[in-house]
Image (cartoon, rainbow, N blue to C red):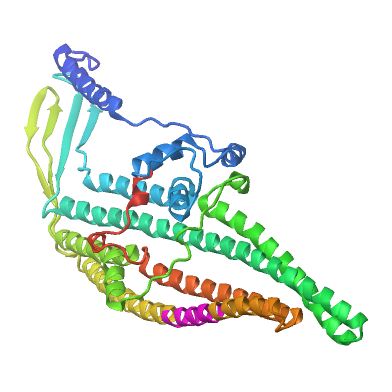
Amino acid sequence: MNADYIDPRNGSRWRGIGWSVLLGVLIAAPGCVRFESRPLSSTANFDSFQARSLADPGLRRFFETNGMATSWPRLEWDLQALTMAAFYFHPDLDVARASLDLARAGGRTAAERPNPTLSVAPSYNTSMGIPSPWLVTAALDIPVETAGKRGYRIAEAGHVTEIARLNIGAVAWQVRSRLRRSLLDLYVAQETQVLLKNQQEVQGESLRLLELQHAEGAVSAFEVTQARIAADSTRLVLRDAERQQAEAQVAVANAVGLPSAALTGVTLSFAGLIDLPSEIPVESARRQALLNRPDVLAALAEYNASQSALQLEIAKQYPDIHFNPGYEFDQGDNKWSPGVAVTLPVFSRNKGPISEAEARRSQSAANFNALQVRVMGDIERAVAACHAVSQKGREAEAIQSNLVTQEKTARAMIEAGEISKSELIALRLQLSASALARLDSLTRAQLAFQQLEDVLQSPFGLPASLWQHPIRVAAAIP
């Protein structure tokens, strides 16, 4: 018989195998993810940023979603409202949320099971035509993971996802902290201008009075010159305060994630910004930090992830099983064969990776303990600073109150002719300088208090019911 002859029955079997492989590919194809292009344009991003404003309809929905529904547009924007706007607009939170999405994708990867492998190896024997020159071998490799490896991978990925989620809380706090500092700088700049303008007015009265007295020969030219220098210095300081206000206004907008023009015409409220706690319980602050700081909880999640990684490496000591059922069409004969493949742990028992995983777990534990100690020290220093500046603030407040009383008394005395106008002006200048010193003390106290809140990474006095979980308001941002 001709060597090129192919048995139709055997040829149909070969075609059947080919069609089976093709059918399997066609079945799997619809489930494949297709690429979707998303061009990124710096010009479009710039235009989008410049168009941002506090009247954004999406921002209103975000407020309503987080239980802050109110009249819209808002008449005033305080620290709380601006913080929510920053959680909506600030790009740092977009980066943190993208990291969380990446971690969640890693969790889906960890949960996937290995695919079986189908291999087909046809061959043609040109020296044989009967019964068939074809030799077709088909093998299926079905991997089966053992010792709970998939579960340990899923657990490790879950801890990594928790770290990314906690990082959103840490970033949200950084956003809020920068906003609070910028808003405080704006408040101080505005108050400084008010006090300096008042001081400038008093210095002007004093200078005019001294010029009259100098014309009458009552005072020397040196005293007039000194008063003029003081007035000029105040005018320069006032210009500097105006510059600081302009910079602080831009800083507030940047801290929210808006262009500076977006705050034009917006009424900012400083209510609650300058309030200080009457007392600072150290133990309460310590517990709040340990149970609420995102980085502390993230360090604990990192340790748990290292635990799962160690369990996975230990499980890898036990080889996976590969079931290898096969089919062979051998020159007209159908041959079926079961098969099992196991890697023999003869030369390697995964000791090296296990040692590395154990070392990483020990490192994570050391990092967690070091972070706790560092946090405790930071809390002690922040509380001590708060006590010190608060005491100074109370003393400045007492001095200011005493000078206000003296001014009232002096005004009554000048009406009675008991003191001169120059003495009243001198007292008013002293009162103005005291008011500036009081504002400086208040600013330092607020900065120390903010440092304490930054150490806690949460608002001081957070209710105990929330200590068990970090702030999650940013995680709800779409």
Which quadrant is home to the C terminus? top left
Q: How many numbered marks does the figure carry? A: 0
Q: Nearer the viewer, residue 353 or 306?
A: 306
Q: Is residue 290 above or below residue 66?
A: below
Give the residues drawn in magenta, as a range. Answer: 387-400
Q: Nearer the viewer, residue 302 or 445?
A: 445
Q: Position of residue 363 (x, y in %)?
A: 29, 73
Residue 423 among those drawn in magenta: no
Whether residue 159 is visible = yes
Q: Quadrant of residue 67?
A: top left
Q: Measuring 44% from the left and 80% from the top, which residue is drawn there?
A: 385
Residue 396 among those drawn in magenta: yes
Q: Nearer the viewer, residue 252 or 355?
A: 252
Q: Is residue 296 above or below residue 215?
A: above
Q: Is residue 3 left or right of residue 258?
A: left
Q: Position of residue 409 (x, y in %)?
A: 61, 79
Q: Is residue 218 left or right of residue 335?
A: right
Q: Measuring 52% from the left and 38% from the top, which residue is drawn there?
A: 55
Q: Position of residue 361 (x, y in %)?
A: 25, 70
Whether residue 368 is visible = no
